[in-house]
Image (cartoon, rainbow, N blue to C red):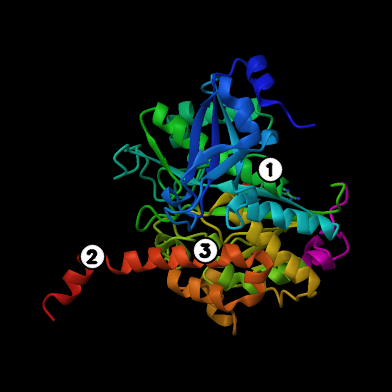
């Protein structure tokens, strides 16, 4: 039974609905719709000019309608008058093929048709910075190894506990919060869920963290590498696959190496095979490549991968198997689109399952110190253009995630790369002026 949003509004005292969708560049777009008008909008959707957002449309396109998925509705815990609801983009009665939430829903359906239910948990790291974005907000947060800094996390208790309280109120199973490895950086964890639910929560989490930071006179950023020399914002994703009932974890096999079943290894094989191309989605910005290819940070390690390798419980590789029945993809960063992250994992993983892909040997070494000993480990792309080209050449992945999406994504991302290249930098003046 679909939840009736008008009745929900009456019941909860909601005055406005924020009908929200996420475009290809991760921007969340919304219309604030008064509760009096929500019944019609629940049917028809809220109208948008698609060209005004990053969806690869022209000004001549007909109206885009964002149709709320009532099952995703969340009353804002910090502003009870308003409820956020994720929407699916439609045009002239058809789903828009390249819209990220539609891309993910299609892959979830494909997985279900193959008897699989993908469950994931994300670790969306962020920095709390000054409102002008120039520096971290806590001037006393200067330790060389600031990870788990007890004093520094308590100086931000008002922000962190407020967000965590809200996650508890929403029933997300929040279970820990910490100061992360960079000065000014934090991580908050909640329980894993079905891929679409995790994507909706991940989107809402970003909105919530930014909103609560602003409320406290700060700013939150998920930018992959906001400060040179400091560890960047990762967005690790833990993955397991279950049967359609969600009762049996088909990745779990206590007898197998690392407790990862044959199906788990094939799914992982798909991720390994497509890693260099799927980076175009998991690491989608120019800045992303300053995180994964960074030199050692002041804390001693970047905690991000630069090669396509996997291992057991060891955080220096692209994939870690922390315990039985799941693995952690450490590649994605804070700029990742929450829906496309899940979509590309399912696309690559299903391809791996279908082709019984082999993840190759695992290397149980400190990749940061001994990585040179691993022969033939593919390097991750060095920049966004390399990643886009790798993606464009990966017909299998493009097919698996959807050609309509891939075409639109590549077009807009190449435009972004070209915009970056036409930007004159101080570095080139400094290094070229006197040549
Ligand atoms: P770490 O920092 O060690 O990588 P965290 O505790 O920060 O781990 O995050 C782990 C994430 O993995 C959480 O979201 C958790 O719910 C999720 N997770 C745990 N078990 C599974 C599983 N079987 N499948 C998918 N995600 C899982
Ligand atoms: Mg963590
Ligand atoms: Mg992690």
Nearest to the eye among marks 3 and 2: give it. 3
How many other residues sit within 10 Å of disc 1, few (<14), some (14-19) or many (≥20)?
Answer: some
Disc on res. 408: 3
Percent of width and height locating residue 30: 49, 37
Disc on res. 425: 2
Residues 404 and 124: in front is 404
- Look at the numbered disc 1 and say if its residue's Cβ is closer than 8 Å to ligand 1: no
Disc on res. 197: 1
Percent of width and height locating residue 200: 62, 42
Percent of width and height locating residue 144: 39, 50
Q: What's the CA distance linking mark 3 and mark 2?
A: 28 Å
Residues 197 and 173: in front is 197
Residue that lies at the very extreme toward the bottom in this rendered image? 375
Q: Residue at x 46, y 45 (%)?
A: 49
How many other residues sit within 10 Å of disc 3, few (<14), some (14-19) or many (≥20)?
Answer: some
Q: What's the CA distance linking mark 2 and mark 1?
A: 41 Å
Residues 40 and 247: in front is 40
Q: Residue at x 71, y 57 (%)?
A: 107
Q: What's the CA distance linking mark 1 and mark 3?
A: 25 Å
């Amino acid at each position: 039974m679909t939840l009736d949003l008008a009745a929900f509004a009456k019941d909860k005292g909601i005055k406005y609905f924020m009908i929200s969708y996420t475009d290809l560049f991760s921007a969340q777009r919304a219309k604030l719709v008064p509760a009096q008008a929500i019944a019609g909008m629940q049917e028809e959707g809220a109208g948008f000019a698609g060209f005004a957002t990053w969806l690869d449309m022209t000004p001549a396109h007909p109206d885009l309608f964002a149709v709320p998925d009532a099952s995703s509705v969340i009353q804002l815990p910090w502003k009870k008058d308003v409820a956020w609801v994720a929407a699916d983009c439609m045009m002239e009665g058809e789903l828009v093929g390249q819209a990220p939430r539609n891309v993910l829903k299609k892959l979830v359906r494909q997985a279900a048709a193959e008897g699989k239910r993908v469950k994931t948990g994300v670790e969306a790291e962020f920095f709390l910075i000054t409102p002008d974005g120039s520096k971290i907000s806590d001037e006393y947060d200067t330790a060389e190894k600031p990870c788990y800094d007890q004093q520094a996390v308590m100086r931000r208790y008002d922000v962190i506990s407020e967000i965590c309280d809200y996650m508890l109120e929403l029933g997300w199973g929040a279970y820990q919060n910490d100061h992360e490895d960079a000065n000014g950086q934090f991580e908050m964890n909640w329980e894993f869920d079905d891929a679409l639910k995790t994507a909706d929560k991940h989107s809402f989490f970003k909105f919530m963290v930014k909103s609560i930071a602003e409320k406290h006179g700060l700013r939150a950023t998920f930018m992959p590498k906001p400060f040179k020399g400091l560890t960047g914002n990762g967005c690790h994703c833990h993955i397991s696959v279950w049967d359609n009932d969600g009762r049996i974890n088909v990745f779990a096999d206590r007898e197998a190496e690392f407790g990862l079943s044959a199906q788990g290894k094939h799914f992982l094989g798909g991720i390994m095979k497509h890693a260099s191309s799927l980076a175009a989605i998991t690491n989608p910005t120019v800045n992303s490549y300053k995180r994964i290819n960074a030199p050692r940070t002041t804390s001693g390690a970047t905690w991000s991968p630069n090669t396509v390798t996997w291992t057991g419980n060891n955080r220096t590789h692209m994939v870690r198997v922390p315990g039985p029945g799941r693995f952690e993809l450490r590649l994605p960063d804070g700029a990742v689109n929450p829906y496309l992250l899940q979509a590309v994992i399912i696309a690559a993983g299903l391809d791996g399952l279908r082709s019984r892909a082999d993840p190759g040997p695992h290397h149980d070494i400190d990749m940061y110190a001994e990585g040179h000993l691993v022969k033939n480990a593919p390097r991750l792309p060095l920049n966004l253009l390399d990643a886009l080209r790798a993606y464009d050449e990966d017909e299998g992945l493009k097919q698996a995630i959807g050609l309509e999406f891939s075409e639109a994504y590549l077009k807009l991302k190449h435009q972004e790369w070209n915009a970056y290249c036409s930007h004159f930098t101080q570095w080139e003046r400094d290094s070229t002026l006197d040549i």
